[in-house]
Amino acid sequence: MEDNLADDDIEIELAPIAVQLAYVQQLLGNTPEAMEAYTGIINRNLADESSLAVAINNLVVLKGPKDISDSLRKLDRLIEKGNGAQRFQLSNGLESKLSPKQRETIYANCVLLLLHSNKMDQARELVAALQDMFADSVMPVLLQAAVLVRENKSGKAEEILGQFAEKFPDKAKVVLLARAQVAAAAGHPQIAAESLSKIADIQHLPATVATIVSLKERAGDIDGAEAVFDSAIQWWSNSMTEDNKRTVIMQEAASFKLKHGREKEAACLYEELVKSHKSLQALIGLVTTAARVDVDKAESYEKQLKPLLGLKGVDVESLERTSGAKHVQSDSHVEVTKAYEESKNEDKAKKKRKRKPRYPKGFDPANPGPSPDPERWLPKRERSSYMPKRKDKRASQVRGSQGAVVREKHEATGTDTSANISNSKSDLVTTSKGSSQSVAPSQSKPSSKSSKKKSRK
């Protein structure tokens, strides 16, 4: 049966399959291919509303905290505010087309983006609405704790998570893990260790035991850490699983007890390991530990160690009387060292070859002359030999035009003025008429002075 469908109609029909193929690429770790497929579906905008919403959400997840504003704009197309009791709802009828898990995931990603963009008021409002929309789910409580941690309210977040774990024990595993992480990051190791101890599924696993012991040790509860080791050893002793972790935990417990000065208990654990598994590492630990507590036991187990080559003819008592071992170089090593030092000295001699200094032209190194002035690099004003120029006091008395200055000079010089005038007359021959006329008043001055002197006589 053939249907004459347009290309757009065919693409609309195949849109859910295209989204599923992109999701498979995402699961396989082919992130660029998945992002390209999601982007193509969103840009063409030919898919149905549910497929388009899934493509947008998955693309936002792949982007992560990169390009937050664009991701928020895409999710805002899917979420709108409601008018009734439900404050938020999905647009385009997606409330009925998507499963509750898909709707919850879209809302949770929107909250995380709001936290990354520091829009705390909107994130707080959306989280409060999610608690009413998904009352039996774990996600709203985790998002509320994330908002409180972002607001530096870690204690309140720990309290909320603890209350939810007590109210819903069947969903407490994820909540307790989150509580332990929040408490450890906030510097509350005792609360973190307590949260991990309440998870029965994983509390005896080696990784969990190591984490709890480390937290209790940080909190200063050495007895509690030792009790965790003892409980884990007892649990694995009664366990019938094939992959038994009792040996690993006993080895770590013995090291922990030895570290904190409990040699007898550590020696007992090492001895049990030696008897049950014939472990060479445990035997070494037993000998070194028992040497501090029970020397006879250490000597008896020391015989099980393989003898070291070259130690048969060693006198222990003579070694104890000596001041200590000295490093003796062999002849071959001495020769190599000497050859290396000689080659090194030759290289240094080659590098230290001096060149003759180059002098400027006309300089005689035998008679260099006087030493240079030590103040030659200083500015002239800062040198000790600097003498500022004197200012001409007569320059400050000059007023008026240039002609008045010439007249005062002639009056002050007296008889020299007449000589200057005669010289100026000879010079005026080559000047213009206007210049000769300007000198005329100065020629009449000496005559007036001589007439005055005659009259006084």
Image (tube, rainbow, N blue to C red):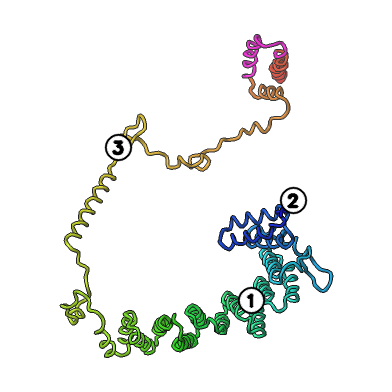
Q: Are marks 1 and 3 in contact (CB under 8 Å)?
A: no
Disc 1 to disc 3, C-alpha distance? 75 Å
Which quadrant does the N terminus fall into? bottom right
Name the amino acid type tagged 2. Asn
Circle 3: element type: loop
| Residue 156 pos. (x, y %) | 66, 79
Span colored in magenta: 416-435
Going by the image, does 277 lie left or right of 69? left
Q: CA distance from mark 2 to mark 3?
A: 98 Å
Mark 3 sits on what residue? 356
Residue 185 drawn above or below residue 452: below
Where is residue 91 drawn, in percent x and y?
Answer: 78, 64
Figure check: 444 above or below 218: above
- Nearer the observer, disc 1 or disc 3? 1
- Mark number displayed over residue 4: 2
Q: Nearer the viewer, residue 219 or 256?
A: 256
Amino acid marked by disc 3: Lys
For image coordinates 64% across by 63% down, the residue present is 61
Crowd class of label 3 (few under 14; some 14 to 19; many from 20; radius 10 Å): few
- Percent position (x, y) of residue 252? 42, 81
Location of mark 1 (residue): 154
Residue 152 highlighted magenta (yes or no): no
| Dot 2 or dot 1, earlier in sequence | 2
Residue 386 sits above or below residue 428 on the image: below
Q: Whole-Å distance between the Cαs marked 2 and 1? A: 62 Å
Asked if the residues shown at circle 2 and circle 3 are in contact, with their CB atoms under 8 angstroms apart, the answer is: no
**Which class describes the residues within 10 Å of circle 2: few (<14), some (14-19), or many (20+)?**
few
